[in-house]
Amino acid sequence: PVAEPARADPAVTNWTSLTRGGGEVRIQGVSKSFGPLKVLDDVSLTVPPGSVTVILGQSGSGKSTLLRSINHLERVDDGFVAIDGELIGYRQDGDTLYELKEKDILKRRVDVGMVFQNFNLFPHLTALENVIEAPIVVRGASREEAAARARELLARVGLSEKADVYPRQLSGGQQQRVAIARALALRPKVLLFDEPTSALDPELVGEVLDVIKELARSGTTLIIVTHEIGFAREVADRVVFMEQGRILETGAPEAVFNAPEHPRTREFLAKVL
Ligand code: ADP
Ligand code: MG
Protein backbone atom coordinates (compact mmCIF):
# COMPACT_ATOMS: atom_id res chain seq x y z
CA PRO A 1 0.00 0.00 0.00
CA VAL A 2 1.19 3.49 -0.81
CA ALA A 3 0.65 6.39 1.54
CA GLU A 4 -0.89 9.61 0.30
CA PRO A 5 2.00 11.97 -0.50
CA ALA A 6 0.86 14.40 2.16
CA ARG A 7 1.64 11.85 4.86
CA ALA A 8 4.27 9.82 3.08
CA ASP A 9 7.32 8.61 4.92
CA PRO A 10 10.32 10.13 3.08
CA ALA A 11 12.06 6.76 3.28
CA VAL A 12 9.18 5.21 1.36
CA THR A 13 8.80 7.96 -1.21
CA ASN A 14 12.27 8.16 -2.59
CA TRP A 15 11.79 10.59 -5.44
CA THR A 16 15.50 10.87 -6.03
CA SER A 17 15.52 7.69 -8.03
CA LEU A 18 12.85 9.13 -10.28
CA THR A 19 14.91 11.96 -11.63
CA ARG A 20 18.44 12.17 -12.88
CA GLY A 21 20.12 14.71 -10.64
CA GLY A 22 22.08 17.64 -12.05
CA GLY A 23 19.71 20.17 -13.49
CA GLU A 24 21.49 23.50 -13.45
CA VAL A 25 19.45 25.93 -15.53
CA ARG A 26 21.31 28.84 -17.02
CA ILE A 27 19.25 31.56 -18.65
CA GLN A 28 21.52 34.06 -20.31
CA GLY A 29 20.44 37.36 -21.86
CA VAL A 30 17.12 36.04 -23.11
CA SER A 31 14.87 38.40 -25.02
CA LYS A 32 11.63 37.65 -26.81
CA SER A 33 9.09 39.80 -28.60
CA PHE A 34 5.67 39.07 -30.01
CA GLY A 35 5.43 41.60 -32.83
CA PRO A 36 6.07 44.99 -31.26
CA LEU A 37 5.59 43.70 -27.70
CA LYS A 38 8.81 42.89 -25.86
CA VAL A 39 7.78 40.10 -23.49
CA LEU A 40 11.23 39.12 -22.21
CA ASP A 41 13.86 41.80 -21.96
CA ASP A 42 17.40 40.56 -21.41
CA VAL A 43 16.57 38.04 -18.70
CA SER A 44 19.48 36.27 -17.01
CA LEU A 45 19.13 33.80 -14.18
CA THR A 46 21.16 30.82 -13.06
CA VAL A 47 19.28 28.19 -11.09
CA PRO A 48 21.56 25.82 -9.16
CA PRO A 49 20.95 22.09 -9.48
CA GLY A 50 18.50 20.74 -6.94
CA SER A 51 17.20 24.16 -5.97
CA VAL A 52 13.65 25.46 -5.88
CA THR A 53 12.94 28.79 -7.54
CA VAL A 54 9.57 30.51 -7.34
CA ILE A 55 8.74 33.13 -9.96
CA LEU A 56 6.27 35.83 -9.02
CA GLY A 57 4.82 38.68 -10.99
CA GLN A 58 1.54 40.01 -12.17
CA SER A 59 -0.33 38.66 -15.14
CA GLY A 60 1.38 39.55 -18.41
CA SER A 61 4.84 40.04 -16.89
CA GLY A 62 6.34 37.25 -19.01
CA LYS A 63 6.47 34.37 -16.51
CA SER A 64 4.92 31.75 -18.79
CA THR A 65 6.99 32.86 -21.75
CA LEU A 66 10.13 32.53 -19.65
CA LEU A 67 9.20 29.00 -18.56
CA ARG A 68 8.31 28.05 -22.13
CA SER A 69 11.67 29.41 -23.30
CA ILE A 70 13.49 27.05 -20.96
CA ASN A 71 12.34 23.97 -22.86
CA HIS A 72 12.23 25.69 -26.23
CA LEU A 73 8.45 25.66 -26.51
CA GLU A 74 9.16 29.30 -27.25
CA ARG A 75 11.98 30.26 -29.60
CA VAL A 76 13.82 33.21 -28.09
CA ASP A 77 15.06 36.13 -30.19
CA ASP A 78 18.27 36.61 -28.30
CA GLY A 79 20.27 34.85 -25.60
CA PHE A 80 20.09 31.18 -24.71
CA VAL A 81 19.09 28.64 -22.13
CA ALA A 82 21.30 25.73 -21.15
CA ILE A 83 20.63 22.77 -18.87
CA ASP A 84 23.85 21.50 -17.29
CA GLY A 85 25.71 23.41 -19.97
CA GLU A 86 23.79 21.91 -22.87
CA LEU A 87 21.51 23.94 -25.11
CA ILE A 88 18.05 22.50 -25.69
CA GLY A 89 16.85 23.95 -28.99
CA TYR A 90 20.17 24.66 -30.65
CA ARG A 91 23.56 23.33 -31.46
CA GLN A 92 26.52 25.62 -31.44
CA ASP A 93 29.00 25.83 -34.27
CA GLY A 94 31.70 28.39 -33.55
CA ASP A 95 29.86 31.60 -32.71
CA THR A 96 26.66 30.58 -34.45
CA LEU A 97 23.67 28.78 -33.03
CA TYR A 98 21.67 26.52 -35.33
CA GLU A 99 18.20 25.47 -34.35
CA LEU A 100 17.82 21.71 -34.01
CA LYS A 101 15.28 19.71 -35.96
CA GLU A 102 12.00 19.05 -34.16
CA LYS A 103 12.84 15.42 -33.45
CA ASP A 104 16.20 16.38 -31.96
CA ILE A 105 14.52 19.07 -29.86
CA LEU A 106 12.14 16.42 -28.52
CA LYS A 107 15.10 14.27 -27.53
CA ARG A 108 16.80 17.14 -25.72
CA ARG A 109 13.56 18.16 -24.06
CA VAL A 110 13.49 14.99 -21.96
CA ASP A 111 15.66 16.88 -19.47
CA VAL A 112 12.80 19.23 -18.70
CA GLY A 113 9.33 18.22 -17.52
CA MET A 114 6.51 20.74 -17.54
CA VAL A 115 3.23 20.99 -15.65
CA PHE A 116 0.62 23.45 -16.87
CA GLN A 117 -2.15 25.37 -15.17
CA ASN A 118 -4.88 23.46 -16.99
CA PHE A 119 -3.28 20.02 -16.63
CA ASN A 120 -3.30 19.44 -20.42
CA LEU A 121 -3.89 15.71 -20.05
CA PHE A 122 -4.89 13.80 -23.16
CA PRO A 123 -8.66 13.43 -22.58
CA HIS A 124 -9.01 10.23 -24.62
CA LEU A 125 -6.25 8.44 -22.68
CA THR A 126 -6.47 6.95 -19.19
CA ALA A 127 -4.24 8.20 -16.39
CA LEU A 128 -1.80 5.36 -17.04
CA GLU A 129 -1.82 5.91 -20.80
CA ASN A 130 -1.14 9.61 -20.26
CA VAL A 131 1.97 8.73 -18.27
CA ILE A 132 3.34 6.05 -20.64
CA GLU A 133 2.82 8.05 -23.86
CA ALA A 134 6.10 10.01 -23.82
CA PRO A 135 8.41 7.16 -22.77
CA ILE A 136 7.01 5.02 -25.59
CA VAL A 137 6.98 7.73 -28.27
CA VAL A 138 10.11 9.68 -27.35
CA ARG A 139 12.29 7.04 -25.78
CA GLY A 140 11.04 3.95 -27.54
CA ALA A 141 10.32 2.21 -24.25
CA SER A 142 8.29 -0.99 -24.37
CA ARG A 143 4.71 -0.74 -23.18
CA GLU A 144 5.41 -3.09 -20.25
CA GLU A 145 8.48 -1.17 -19.12
CA ALA A 146 6.69 2.19 -19.43
CA ALA A 147 3.60 0.87 -17.63
CA ALA A 148 5.64 -0.46 -14.71
CA ARG A 149 7.25 2.91 -14.19
CA ALA A 150 3.96 4.74 -14.72
CA ARG A 151 2.31 2.66 -11.97
CA GLU A 152 5.17 3.53 -9.67
CA LEU A 153 4.77 7.23 -10.48
CA LEU A 154 1.01 7.15 -10.03
CA ALA A 155 1.56 5.49 -6.65
CA ARG A 156 3.92 8.27 -5.64
CA VAL A 157 1.29 10.89 -6.34
CA GLY A 158 -1.27 8.84 -4.43
CA LEU A 159 -3.26 7.65 -7.45
CA SER A 160 -2.61 3.91 -7.67
CA GLU A 161 -6.34 3.30 -7.76
CA LYS A 162 -6.92 5.65 -10.68
CA ALA A 163 -4.58 4.20 -13.29
CA ASP A 164 -7.37 3.10 -15.59
CA VAL A 165 -9.74 6.03 -15.41
CA TYR A 166 -10.04 8.93 -17.83
CA PRO A 167 -9.22 12.55 -16.93
CA ARG A 168 -12.91 13.56 -16.90
CA GLN A 169 -13.48 11.05 -14.10
CA LEU A 170 -10.86 12.75 -11.92
CA SER A 171 -11.01 15.88 -9.79
CA GLY A 172 -8.82 18.80 -10.83
CA GLY A 173 -6.36 17.97 -8.06
CA GLN A 174 -6.15 14.36 -9.20
CA GLN A 175 -5.71 15.43 -12.83
CA GLN A 176 -2.88 17.72 -11.84
CA ARG A 177 -1.22 14.89 -9.91
CA VAL A 178 -1.44 12.70 -13.02
CA ALA A 179 0.14 15.56 -14.96
CA ILE A 180 3.00 15.63 -12.43
CA ALA A 181 3.48 11.87 -12.80
CA ARG A 182 3.50 12.35 -16.57
CA ALA A 183 6.09 15.12 -16.30
CA LEU A 184 8.31 12.74 -14.31
CA ALA A 185 7.97 9.89 -16.77
CA LEU A 186 11.05 10.80 -18.78
CA ARG A 187 13.18 11.23 -15.67
CA PRO A 188 13.74 14.96 -16.10
CA LYS A 189 16.51 16.94 -14.47
CA VAL A 190 14.31 19.98 -14.15
CA LEU A 191 10.58 20.41 -13.59
CA LEU A 192 8.74 23.55 -14.57
CA PHE A 193 5.36 24.39 -13.04
CA ASP A 194 3.22 27.12 -14.55
CA GLU A 195 0.62 28.13 -11.96
CA PRO A 196 -0.08 24.48 -11.13
CA THR A 197 -2.85 25.26 -8.65
CA SER A 198 -4.50 28.31 -10.22
CA ALA A 199 -7.25 26.31 -11.92
CA LEU A 200 -8.11 24.29 -8.81
CA ASP A 201 -10.91 24.68 -6.32
CA PRO A 202 -9.36 25.93 -3.06
CA GLU A 203 -9.88 22.64 -1.24
CA LEU A 204 -7.82 20.79 -3.90
CA VAL A 205 -4.81 23.11 -3.85
CA GLY A 206 -3.16 21.45 -0.84
CA GLU A 207 -2.94 17.95 -2.31
CA VAL A 208 -1.06 19.27 -5.34
CA LEU A 209 1.23 21.52 -3.30
CA ASP A 210 2.03 18.55 -1.05
CA VAL A 211 3.25 16.54 -4.05
CA ILE A 212 5.38 19.48 -5.19
CA LYS A 213 6.81 19.84 -1.67
CA GLU A 214 7.82 16.18 -1.75
CA LEU A 215 9.58 16.79 -5.04
CA ALA A 216 11.29 19.86 -3.61
CA ARG A 217 12.76 17.72 -0.85
CA SER A 218 14.01 15.19 -3.37
CA GLY A 219 16.67 17.38 -4.93
CA THR A 220 14.99 17.84 -8.29
CA THR A 221 15.48 21.31 -9.72
CA LEU A 222 12.11 23.04 -9.64
CA ILE A 223 11.06 26.32 -11.20
CA ILE A 224 7.56 27.24 -10.15
CA VAL A 225 5.34 30.12 -11.20
CA THR A 226 2.75 30.53 -8.46
CA HIS A 227 0.84 33.07 -6.43
CA GLU A 228 0.86 30.76 -3.39
CA ILE A 229 3.04 32.90 -1.16
CA GLY A 230 2.86 30.61 1.89
CA PHE A 231 4.05 27.72 -0.24
CA ALA A 232 6.85 29.87 -1.69
CA ARG A 233 8.00 30.84 1.79
CA GLU A 234 8.11 27.21 2.79
CA VAL A 235 9.82 25.57 -0.20
CA ALA A 236 11.64 28.20 -2.24
CA ASP A 237 15.38 28.59 -2.03
CA ARG A 238 14.99 31.68 -4.13
CA VAL A 239 12.20 33.97 -5.20
CA VAL A 240 12.29 35.90 -8.46
CA PHE A 241 10.00 38.86 -9.07
CA MET A 242 9.27 39.76 -12.71
CA GLU A 243 7.68 42.78 -14.25
CA GLN A 244 7.33 43.75 -17.89
CA GLY A 245 9.67 41.04 -19.08
CA ARG A 246 12.44 41.82 -16.63
CA ILE A 247 13.63 40.39 -13.38
CA LEU A 248 13.28 43.23 -10.89
CA GLU A 249 14.34 41.43 -7.76
CA THR A 250 15.61 38.05 -6.63
CA GLY A 251 16.49 36.79 -3.20
CA ALA A 252 15.79 34.34 -0.43
CA PRO A 253 12.08 34.19 0.43
CA GLU A 254 12.58 35.84 3.84
CA ALA A 255 14.35 38.75 2.19
CA VAL A 256 11.92 39.27 -0.68
CA PHE A 257 8.76 38.76 1.39
CA ASN A 258 9.81 40.53 4.59
CA ALA A 259 11.85 43.34 3.13
CA PRO A 260 11.35 43.70 -0.63
CA GLU A 261 13.84 46.12 -2.09
CA HIS A 262 11.91 47.23 -5.12
CA PRO A 263 8.77 49.38 -4.73
CA ARG A 264 7.04 47.34 -7.45
CA THR A 265 7.72 44.13 -5.52
CA ARG A 266 6.21 45.76 -2.40
CA GLU A 267 3.10 46.79 -4.35
CA PHE A 268 2.69 43.33 -5.82
CA LEU A 269 3.07 41.61 -2.46
CA ALA A 270 0.61 44.00 -0.84
CA LYS A 271 -1.97 42.73 -3.35
CA VAL A 272 -1.33 38.99 -3.03
CA LEU A 273 -0.49 38.67 0.67
P1 ADP B 1 2.44 35.78 -17.58
O1 ADP B 1 2.62 34.31 -17.62
O2 ADP B 1 3.35 36.48 -16.63
O3 ADP B 1 1.00 36.19 -17.35
P2 ADP B 1 2.97 35.63 -20.41
O4 ADP B 1 4.36 35.19 -20.59
O5 ADP B 1 1.89 34.66 -20.63
O6 ADP B 1 2.82 36.38 -19.01
O7 ADP B 1 2.69 36.82 -21.41
C1 ADP B 1 3.47 38.00 -21.45
C2 ADP B 1 2.92 38.92 -22.52
O8 ADP B 1 3.10 38.33 -23.79
C3 ADP B 1 1.43 39.19 -22.39
O9 ADP B 1 1.19 40.52 -22.76
C4 ADP B 1 0.82 38.25 -23.39
O10 ADP B 1 -0.40 38.74 -23.87
C5 ADP B 1 1.87 38.21 -24.48
N1 ADP B 1 1.91 36.93 -25.22
C6 ADP B 1 2.17 35.72 -24.68
N2 ADP B 1 2.14 34.76 -25.63
C7 ADP B 1 1.89 35.39 -26.79
C8 ADP B 1 1.75 34.95 -28.15
N3 ADP B 1 1.91 33.68 -28.50
N4 ADP B 1 1.47 35.90 -29.09
C9 ADP B 1 1.35 37.19 -28.74
N5 ADP B 1 1.46 37.68 -27.50
C10 ADP B 1 1.73 36.80 -26.52
MG1 MG C 1 1.30 32.80 -17.23
Image (cartoon, grey):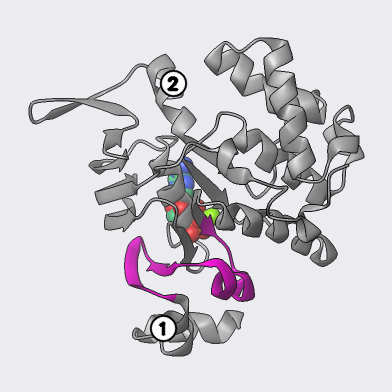
State the residue in front, 153 or 11.
11
Can the viewer see residue 123? no
Q: Which residues are magenta?
A: 224-252
Q: Please check the rendered image and state whether residue 100 is part of the magenta-colored stretch, yes or no.
A: no
Residue type indicated by callout 2: Lys
Can you say which quadrant of the picture contains the C terminus? bottom right
Q: Residue at x 31, y 20 (%)?
A: 100
Left or right, 24 with reference to 266: left
Whether 135 is drawn above or below 72: the answer is above
Q: Mark 1 or 2 closer to N-term?
A: 2
Whether 270 is drawn above or below 185: the answer is below
Asked which secondary structure carries label 1, the reply is helix
Q: How far from the left and from the top, in percent, is residue 103? A: 43, 15
Asked which secondary structure carries label 2, the reply is helix
Left or right, 154 with reference to 215: right
Mark 1 and 2 residues: CB-CB less than 8 Å, in contact?
Answer: no
Q: How far from the left and from the top, in percent, is residue 67? A: 45, 48
Q: Within 10 Å of the Cα at label 2, are there few (<14), some (14-19), or many (20+) other Cα atoms? A: few
The residue identified by callout 1 is 255
The residue identified by callout 2 is 107
Residue 39 figure quarter? bottom left
Residue 45 figure quarter? bottom left
Left or right, 163 with reference to 44: right
Tell me how far mark 1 sits from mark 2, CA to CA: 39 Å
Q: Within 10 Å of the Cα at label 1, are there few (<14), some (14-19), or many (20+) other Cα atoms? A: few
Q: Report ligand 2 position as a quadrant.
A: bottom right
Residue most toward the left?
A: 94
